[in-house]
Image: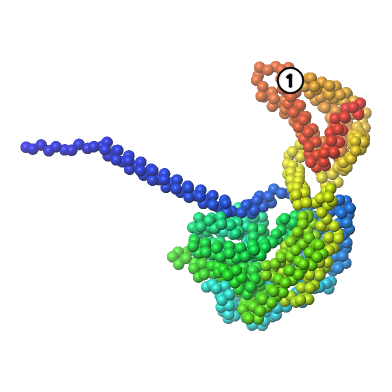
Amino acid sequence: MATVTRAKPQPRTRIVAMTIIQYFAALLAMGALLAYFAQRMYKIGLTLMATSPTPYGARFASGILRSFAYDEQSFFSADGASAEVAEKRRAGFHALAESFEKQFPKTLKAAETFLDGISDLRFTDTNRVPFPFQKLVREKLNVASLAVSSEGPNILDLDGNKTLDVSGSYGVNVCGYDNYKRWISEGWEATKDLGPVLGPLHPVVGENLAMIKAVSKLDEVSFHMSGTEAIMCAVRLAAFNKRRKLVVCFAGAYHGWWDGVQPGPGNERAVTDVLPLKDMSPASLAAIKARASEIACVVVNPLQGFNPNSPPPNDLVLMTSAIRKAASNETMDHYAVWLKTLRQTCTECDVPLMFDEVYTGFRMAPGGAQEYYGVNADMVVYGKTLGGGMPVGVVCGKKELMRRFDPEHPLRVSYVIGTFSALPLTMGSMNAFLKWATSPDARETYDRVGATFDSWIKGTNVELKKEKLPITVHNLTTVWTIIFDQPGRYHWMLQYYLRAEGIALSWVGTGRLLVSLDFTEADFSTCRAALLRAAKRMRDDGWWNLGSPEKPITAASISQGMGKEMAYHTVMKTVREGLLAEILCLPEQDGPRAPVATPPETLREFYEEVMRRKHDDHKASHSNCVNQFMHLISSTIFIFNYYTIWGDCTTTMVLGLFSLFLRQSGHAIFEPPCHDEEELLLGFNTRSKCFVVAGYTLAPIITLLQLSGSVNFVQALEPVARSWLLVTLFFVLGHTGLLWMQYGFRIAMVWLGKLITHPFTDV
């Protein structure tokens, strides 16, 4: 019988084979992980290079920087001007305030009621000028915001004053107020039979739809109540339909007050889905390409071509002339090239390009910025003037981006809707506006007024140069701004001189000005004459003074002064609100409990100030005989300590603490109210002295706990004395330092000199 031989298993070979497979699998996994992290680091690197630090820096600073206000004395010399120049400014300022009171008495009186009850007005009224100047400006230069009628580009107030409006009603007034009044009337006539019925659409909506699609060159339209609301809708639809979360915008661009597109100050929400990139930067294009799969849309405000990478110009932040700049014609030409390149990049990466034309739509051209720059977007947002004088916001987009539901997932929707979104009256006035805006007459008007305004800009700059005034005007179509050509801290004052000369501005002041298409040659002449008169008055009142050859006022000196002021007030307010101010007794800076401190100029004045404070101190808290005797003993010991401190710290501190205890016991028992008076003399009050006692009590306890148990009492005295010395130096030098910061070096030395010489004058 044949024997069957079974093959023996070879477990080692199988184990080795499995080990090799696992090894290669681990290598592949590690390689994939490294590749993933390398890709992530690459994207992060590109993003950091492309991201503008301005919004984050400004937001960070807004949480740290503390407010402060100049008093009347420092208000007029904040740039370091001489007393003579400051006095000239003071006279001009008060003359301007008096002219406002005479010119607008009814308007100013009526405005007081509105300011108390409308938070919007309080916000705009507060934010007209840089914050250190706001207090006195609000008190003296009240700007009324009440009007009763308009005629052409002129506005009539309660007192009958007629002012030429260059505010443009925040961008609404493109065509002239009389035209909007007519369009609203026509809109009402067309829709009054339906009234405010919502839900069913008036037939006029169909006409609007056709005209808007022709202007935007896009497939679908969505109606809303404001530009901000329309931006919210557009971004939400882009994110919904692309299934991406990240929104790209560009540094400084304004897209309404919604926090979803506001990475800088004004938004308290933690922003993780907005990426503010640098305008006109190749790094930004690279970042968009690298992160295309995350980007829902790239949002552009085409008005940024006027001031790339800068926020909308506003007199609130006009701290120096360097804050505001306008793009040159060459830069604006480059911006047009940049938009075309951005359009190509977005197309290649399948990222929707969105134009925020709330401000530029129908202003830069009948077809808006798309026509002006020759670039078509995937989504366009309109607002302001499109309503024909009525509030409106409109989103236009490609069909695949405007969908609000997912056909594959019926419960997945993008809920965007609004009650008054297609109000018949708004649709009627919009219809009247669009019929004009799409007519040949409108295009002729745009071309004619645009050419006239360009000529006005050139002629005005010639006149300004001839008068040696340090300003120039710059424009982008009918949007213009005033640029200051020399350093200065008071450029924002020009807005008030312009108002006095009959020019109506918005709350952003001279930063963003507008002309409407109904401006005549006479209106342009009036505007130029008023600008020249206002600038001359401002110059003559000393606001543009550049100092003397010995002490020039330069951009560097202004920046350094501002930096020191802001740092000082931020540190002082932070300290004042903390426990350190309580411990070291930082005196009040304002109010009835604020000490009066006049810095001495000469050595004799220094001596007299020290002695005066000693006299006041003795009078306030050293009139009791027993207290005086206890002070005599303690002062004698202190004088002895001035000798022993150089050789025997232990004896000095023990005797010093005994004499301090004796001294304060006299105050506590016989003259307890004295500490409040001492605080007015820049000394310690009752609360801070309790901290001093606590410090001297805790110091030996902490020191003894750190020593070993084998140390006897005598051996422990030396380290305890050193700790007492450190506590003394902390309170004395700390209080001196705070006085130095608040009142200056000389006043701090007056207090320190008074403290050191106390024992001698007591005796």
Residue 13, picture quadrant: top left
- How many numbered discs sit on the rendered protein? 1
Which residue is rendered at x = 85% and y = 38% of the image? 746
Residue 454, picture quadrant: bottom right
Q: Position of residue 560 (x, y in %)?
A: 75, 47
Residue furthest to the left in view is 1
* Nearest the eye: 388 or 471: 471
Q: Is residue 203 above or below residue 50?
A: below
Q: Residues within 10 Å of mark 1 (few under 14, many from 20)?
A: many
Which residue is rendered at x = 88% and y = 23% of the image? 636
Tag 1: amino acid: Leu
Q: Secondary structure at mark 1?
A: helix
Horizontal side of 711 relative to 636 (left or right) equals: left
Q: Position of residue 697 (x, y in %)?
A: 74, 28
Horizontal side of 433 relative to 620 (left or right) equals: left
Which residue is rendered at x = 47% and y = 47% of the image? 37
Q: Position of residue 305 (x, y in %)?
A: 64, 63
Scheme of image coloration? rainbow
* Nearest the eye: 546 or 668: 546
Q: State the quadrant of the C terminus.
A: top right
Identify the residue position indicated by label 1 in the image.
717
Q: State the quadrant of the N terminus.
A: top left
Which residue is rendered at x = 85% and y = 30% of the image? 756
Q: Is residue 335 above or below residue 34?
A: below
* Nearest the eye: 588 or 264: 264
* Nearest the eye: 363 or 222: 363
Residue 92, picture quadrant: bottom right
Q: Position of residue 267 (x, y in %)?
A: 64, 56
Specify whether residue 741 is in view: yes
Horizontal side of 367 relative to 295 (left or right) equals: right
